[in-house]
Image: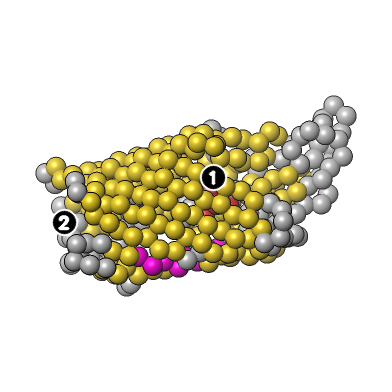
């Protein structure tokens, strides 16, 4: 049994001979990590068909005010560390495990542009490179990119803050050398409800936010599975929460930090991720 992960897209290939009555030459013998999907979760991962892919992102960045009308520019240098584990078996053959890791730096910029109607537009673009290491990496280096636009619109209803968010993005990666590459696009829509908890801790006024979100992939996400058809995902849903402060609060190098978690499901893929506030 030979198993390979290659490129920042981290693909695992396990060539096998067909077993009469068990496999056919057309069955999938390659498992590809959908790296750009995992990386765009920020700090999280997914599992499907014996593959577990986790990407942990350190969100380094700084925001600059560009004018007195509220336009901002946030310069970011997210550093991403990926951990991948695949467990599989061949009919009438051994069970095998493949482990790989990756590291990537994907700098980018996001603008905050207020428009009439209390809408905040946030166009963004990221581009960088990653390196894969571990078991038989093959083509270990790849380009990584994401661009798109997000928008939010808040409403204040008594002590509650309601925020609607939307996003359109396109992302992909490609090996330095000719070989594996992947892209995907997404339309996203979400709603968050946030409320102060009614007590204070020093200068901190804790609040709780809960959100729901839906994701549509016009070209469908592909998740390959060993000796099984590729899983095509067209829609997903998410539910999550975050905690933070209802009043301005700075901690270390973060301004008004929030932290929480989200769970995404749909079409057989299990997804988790850490959220730093409403993900729009």
The residue sitting at 46% across, 54% down in the picture is 147
Q: Is residue 165 left or right of residue 205?
A: right
The residue sitting at 68% across, 51% down in the picture is 180
The segment highlighted magenta reads 74-81
Q: Is residue 66 left or right of residue 46?
A: left
Task: Quickly name the residue at label 2.
Answer: 199
Q: Secondary structure at mark 2?
A: loop
Residue 134, given in percent of the width and then of the height, sits at 70, 63
Residue 86, given in percent of the width and then of the height, sits at 68, 49
Query: 56 above or below 184?
Result: below
Q: Secondary structure at mark 1?
A: strand
Query: 73 above or below 31?
Result: below
80 falls in the magenta region = yes
The residue sitting at 27% across, 56% down in the picture is 113
Of residues 158 and 171, which is closer to you in this image? 171
Instruction: Farthest residue to the bottom: give it.
Output: 252
Task: Quickly name the residue at label 1.
Answer: 184
């Amino acid at each position: 049994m030979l198993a390979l992960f290659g490129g920042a897209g981290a693909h695992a290939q396990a060539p096998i001979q067909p077993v009469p009555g068990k496999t056919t030459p057309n069955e999938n013998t390659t498992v590809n990590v959908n790296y750009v999907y995992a990386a765009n979760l920020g700090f999280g991962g997914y599992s499907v068909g014996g593959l577990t892919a986790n990407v942990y992102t350190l969100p380094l960045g700084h925001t600059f005010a560009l004018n007195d009308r509220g336009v901002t520019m946030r310069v970011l240098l997210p550093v991403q560390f990926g951990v991948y584990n695949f467990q599989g078996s061949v009919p009438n053959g051994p069970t095998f495990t493949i482990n790989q890791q990756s590291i990537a730096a994907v700098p980018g910029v996001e603008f905050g542009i207020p428009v009439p109607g209390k809408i905040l537009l946030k166009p963004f673009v990221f581009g960088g490179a990653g390196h894969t290491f571990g078991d038989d990496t093959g083509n270990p280096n790849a380009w990584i990119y994401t661009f798109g636009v997000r928008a939010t619109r808040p409403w204040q209803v008594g002590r509650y803050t309601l925020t609607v968010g939307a996003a359109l993005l396109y992302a992909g990666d490609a090996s330095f050398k000719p070989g594996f590459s992947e892209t995907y696009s997404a339309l996203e829509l979400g709603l968050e409800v946030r409320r102060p908890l009614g007590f204070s801790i020093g200068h901190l006024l804790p609040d709780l936010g809960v959100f729901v979100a839906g994701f549509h992939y016009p070209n469908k996400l592909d998740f390959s599975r060993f000796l099984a058809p590729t899983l095509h995902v067209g829609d997903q849903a998410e539910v999550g929460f975050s905690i933070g402060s209802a009043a301005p609060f700075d901690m270390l190098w973060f301004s008004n930090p929030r932290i929480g978690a989200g769970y995404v499901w749909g079409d057989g893929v299990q997804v988790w991720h850490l959220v730093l506030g409403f993900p729009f």
